[in-house]
Image (cartoon, rainbow, N blue to C red):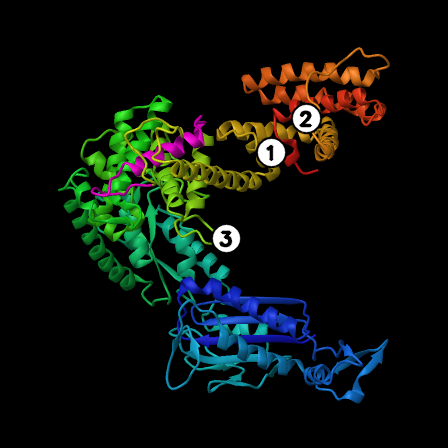
Amino acid sequence: MPQLLLELFSEEIPARMQGGAARDLERMATERLKAAGLTWDALTTWAGPRRLTLVIEGLPAATPDRSEELKGPRANAPEQALEGFLRKTGLTRDQLTERDGVLFAVINEAGRPTTTVIAETVDAIVRAFPWPKSMRWGSGTLRWVRPLKRIVALFDGAVVPFEIDGIASGDVTEGHRFMGSGQPFAVRDFADYRAKLEAQFVLLDAADRRLKILEAARAACHARGLELVDDDGLLDEVAGLAEWPTPILGDMDPQFLALPPEVVRLSMKVHQKYFAVRDPATGTLAPNFIVVANVEASDGGVALAAGNSRVLSARLNDARFFWDEDQKTSLEDRIARLSGVTYHAKLGTLAGKAQSIDKVGSRLAADLGLDVSAAALAGKLSKSDLATSMVGEFPELQGVMGGYYARKEGLSENIAQAIEQQYRPAGPNDFTPTTPFSSVVALAEKFTTIVGFFAIGEKPTGSRDPFALRRAALGVIRILLEQQFRLKLDDVTMYAVQAIASESESGSGYWIWGYDPTQSGPGLSADVVASPQTRIELLELHSDVRGFFADRLKVLLRDQGKRHDLVDAVFALGDDDLVRIVRRVEALDAFLATDDGANLLAGYKRASNILKAEAKKGEVPTGMVATGLLNQPEAETTLAFATDVARTAVDTALETEDFAAAMTALSRLRAPVDAFFTDVMVNSDVPAERDNRLKLLGQVRDVMGRVADFGQVAG
């Protein structure tokens, strides 16, 4: 079947927009062609520095004929209703069909040539393309990311004729801006198009460009006994900057290696798009770099390398100046500058933020038996590097530079490391802080952020999360689980509330809820809050924070293959120790995977349904279950004794947090519960028997509910 080849050729497309543009082209073409009734075998898009390309294999020559029946008004309906239906269908009264007193219109539409659909589709896509930024040029009305120059549109080897804002479709494209022939050339189909582009020094596929960069860069480093520092983000970016990427190894002044390696790498990456190079013998940066050129120079890139080296030296000289100047002012002296920098209009200044981290970090350190005064100092200095020139130039180095400056001032490694790692983990692939002490400061940083924004009503909604609170919550969960910190969410939330509220209006923060910061200790007692309304607001805040962390924990465990309903079942118990919650979830997951667990869950739900039905009729009987009654079924007596034994075993196991043992104790109820439902009629005609059996089912539900709320478990 025929092939469609579409190329939209323009001036340079920013690298950061290319991947999204390829996806948008695929989506928009798919939606419009499907809406027209077309089907195909394969659709592929590519994006590069100067072109977007679409190829569709297996398109039919025309859209299929379509027949549609529309139901209209009744035959005796008012004239206005009939006229409206006729306008909608474009038919006359005698063209309608009547069945059972109702009018129907049958609309037959002949298929259209695919070329007509393609022309309309391309025009609609180009005019509505969602570039993040676009421009208009000349006297036309068309907007595109950069001036659009050519459109190749071939269907089954022939040009699909159309024109968009003066740009006519054709079969002609261009090769590399510098290395190509300089002459436009015609193509017949995709295979011819791709081969001719490569002959004109254009690699169409970004994956091919990335591979070419990696292989050539590693080879250039290997020839000098060096090693390329991998950077996937930079690789993607430079693959979008060059149609024929050519890596060149350059040299830099070794004196710049005295700067922190993060500064050297960022100077290379952010300003120049260079790859860093390391010495494999020492693992440290080498005085070299890899620049990716868009040409193959006749001198092997010697002149290009020298020119780029001079530019890099200028950048690194600036960085060295910042490094030297920043060390003339201590981190503590920079705190005063933060008092004039707003963190958030409703949450005060960066100085107030640091003081909150100081207070929360101190209390967490005390709870965990760590150095309280060191935690306080680390929190106090945590934001000071935001007032340095280096972080002003490279915001990505916040925290990192604070760690370097702390070491230069002679502060302990614990404090320097805590300042450096306070933002970890910055994402799902980032490492958590490496020590318990630095983990405490990172927790304080994240909790004050989450609680502060929740307190002012800035909670994430849908896909909107402008303050990255979901990422912060996942970071908290990962730290707690990896460090096995036994902290309660409610306690830490209250620490953050107290810390934020203690920043007065005259200082760097504001009063939340009229809360009295002179009171100490977690909790919601009446003497801690200013009014009953404040108490309600605090309770709502705690509930919101717990629910937020429950949702994030479900996301994390789901990614690990755990069932999200089990998190709900455990959180329903009111526990807010995430380490204990996860242990319960893991034990519950393993238990429900067994036959005993699955069958006992079914028994629980059956018992629960019976009790719910009884509750609707009135009060469900509770109290001691009688045994040894006249004519009492053996299965009833057996379950009663088994429930008592299970209750004792479960309570003992839960006290020692041996959740596997608690599940084992529950598993012994499986056979008695099955026998009970097989041999015993719960709704006995004898009221005393019926009440006793309902009490027994209630006790079974109660024993199981000590481990988890099985009513929240699916299945």
The location of residue 46, given as percent across then percent down, is 52, 66
Q: Which secondary structure lies at badge 3?
A: loop
Please state the extent of the stretch shown in magenta in the rendering. 483-512
What residue does disc 1 label?
569
Q: Which secondary structure lies at badge 1?
A: helix
- The quadrant holding residue 405 is top left
Q: Disc 2 to disc 3, how far (Cα)?
A: 36 Å
The amino acid marked with disc number 3 is Gly
The residue located at (65%, 24%) in the rendering is 702
Foreground of the two, 704 or 249: 704
What residue does disc 3 label?
462
What residue does disc 2 label?
701
| Residue sticking out furthest to the left | 328
- The quadrant holding residue 117 is bottom right
Foreground of the two, 165 or 536: 536
Whichever of labels 3 and 1 marks the residue nearer the N terminus, that label is 3
Whichever of labels 1 and 2 marks the residue nearer the N terminus, that label is 1
Q: Disc 3 to disc 1, how far (Cα)?
A: 24 Å
Q: Which secondary structure lies at badge 2?
A: helix
Of the two numbered discs 1 and 2 in the rendering, the one whose residue sits closer to the viewer? 2
The residue located at (85%, 23%) in the rendering is 679
Q: Is residue 409 visible?
A: yes
Q: Are marks 1 and 2 in contact (CB under 8 Å)?
A: no
- The quadrant holding residue 298 is bottom left
The location of residue 472, given as percent across then percent down, is 41, 42
The location of residue 433, given as percent across then percent down, is 38, 34
